[in-house]
Amino acid sequence: MEFSEVVRRRRMVRNYSSEPVDPEVVARILAQAQRAPSAGFSQGFAFLVLDTPQDVRRFWEATADDLDAPDSWLRGMMRAPVVVVPLSHKDAYLDRYAEPDKGWTDRDEARWPVPYWHIDTGMASMILLLAAVDEGLGACFFGVPPDHTDAFREAFGVPSTHTPIGAVTLGHRTGDPGTRGSAGRRRHTLEEVVHRSQW
């Protein structure tokens, strides 16, 4: 698929069929996401892949409420056969920029104007979303509720050095998302988001 078509078709999919996803397709998507840029080539991101019904169920048990009476959003999302959790690794950046070629002599987090470990993991997540479209799949990036992060870590043995920046469902989309909620919002025009020479 042409890149412009991949970008045009990319949208958050919140309703999936129960059809399995070929593991080779998931592997290709992850290989694409691994190509994301990272400051100093720190590569401070990782992916927790949950691709069995048992693991996907454990994810929702750890991160969602009301599994016995899920709302329409949760029902659609829980059908996705794959959940990928992108995790940022701050220490990889602090360590990398304390190396001789970077010129810093310490790991002071204050040197970073923004947390690049989260930004780079977000870029990897975006590549993952685009790669899913290229493979003919649907995907949705969503947050892990802060009050469920500890339960998520415990359920999957995620070390404290790695922070889940969200999660991505992958699967075969079903149905038309329609125009309810966020899908019904107008996309800003280019003139509204681009400022030339000055604001």
Image: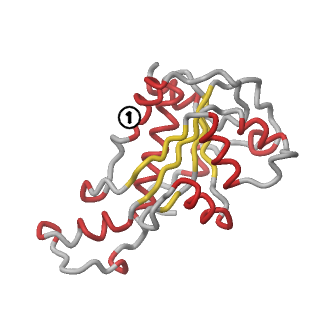
> Is 102 located above or below residue 184 in the figure?
below
Q: Nearer the viewer, residue 64 or 174?
A: 64
In the shown orientation, is residue 34 left or right of residue 42? right
Hey, which quadrant is residue 173 in on the image?
top right
In the shown orientation, is residue 90 left or right of residue 156? left
At x 67%, y 60%, the residue is 145
Q: Residue furthest right?
A: 69
In this figure, which residue is indicated by the disc labeled 1?
Answer: 32
At x 19%, y 76%, the residue is 104
Hey, which quadrant is residue 159 in on the image?
bottom left
Q: Estimate how packed mark 1 is, as few (under 14), some (14 to 19) or many (20 or more) residues with alpha carbons within 10 Å.
A: some
> Is 183 located above or below residue 114 in the figure?
above
Q: Amino acid at mark 1?
A: Gln
Q: Residue furthest left?
A: 100
At x 74%, y 39%, the residue is 183
Q: Nearer the viewer, residue 179 or 34?
A: 34
In the shown orientation, is residue 147 left or right of residue 153? right
